[in-house]
Amino acid sequence: LPGALAGGDGNGLVDDEDERGRVWTHLEAAGYITGGYSGDAVADGSEYDCAATICPDNGFGTGMSIFHGTETQSGTVDAHELITGQGIPVEVIAELDRKIDDDAPNTGVMQSGDDAAFTGTCVTGTAATDAYDLQNPSDNCAAVFRNF
């Protein structure tokens, strides 16, 4: 695209560090979004705290990212995922899941982010009985939308 820093590798997937950052400059160059994103790479391990100069702000001060992988709690098969970025209160994540999906952090199109990727206790229970931890709320949670 004119104005974009570089293309991807042509496989149709956002599956490497460079493409994670470039997807936003491509969407901006195509006129779908605005924001002046740098197109810098989103390094492995920073999917949940992408800088707002690289990725769109989630409204809570952290950038969202897109990636082809398994960043959900129960993800076993790679899929394109929109990662909300961290710093979102668990009450917001839980309410959003109730309204648009199945109110379960480990199933459905919207799932809680992989807890190993950010701090805070956002869910409680075992994989089979996971629930959003509203008794001990964290303000540092994230969600992942699969196959959006």
Image (cartoon, helix red, strand yellow):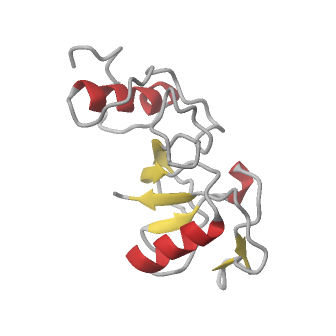
Say above or below: 16 vs 60. Answer: above
Q: Residue at x 45, y 38 (%)?
A: 56
Q: Position of residue 49 (x, y in %)?
A: 62, 40
**Nearer to the camera, 104 or 93:** 93
Say above or below: 33 vs 135. Answer: above
Q: Position of residue 43 (x, y in %)?
A: 60, 30
Q: Residue at x 53, y 67 (%)?
A: 111
Quadrant where the image shows the N terminus? top left
The quarter of the picture where residue 66 lies is top left
Say above or below: 97 vs 5. Answer: below
Q: Position of residue 35 (x, y in %)?
A: 38, 29
> Does residue 84 appear left or right of residue 126 in this picture?
left
Residue 64 visible to the viewer: yes
Q: Given the current orientation, which residue lies at the most extreme bottom position?
A: 129
The quarter of the picture where residue 91 lies is bottom right
Q: Position of residue 122 (x, y in %)?
A: 70, 67
Q: Residue at x 41, y 78 (%)?
A: 99
Say above or below: 67 vs 87. Answer: above
Q: Residue at x 55, y 30 (%)?
A: 42
Q: How many marks?
A: 0
> Does residue 68 appear left or right of residue 136 in this picture?
left
Residue 10 visible to the viewer: no
**Nearer to the camera, 27 or 89:** 89
> Does residue 114 appear left or right of residue 10 in this picture?
right
Quadrant where the image shows the C terminus? bottom left
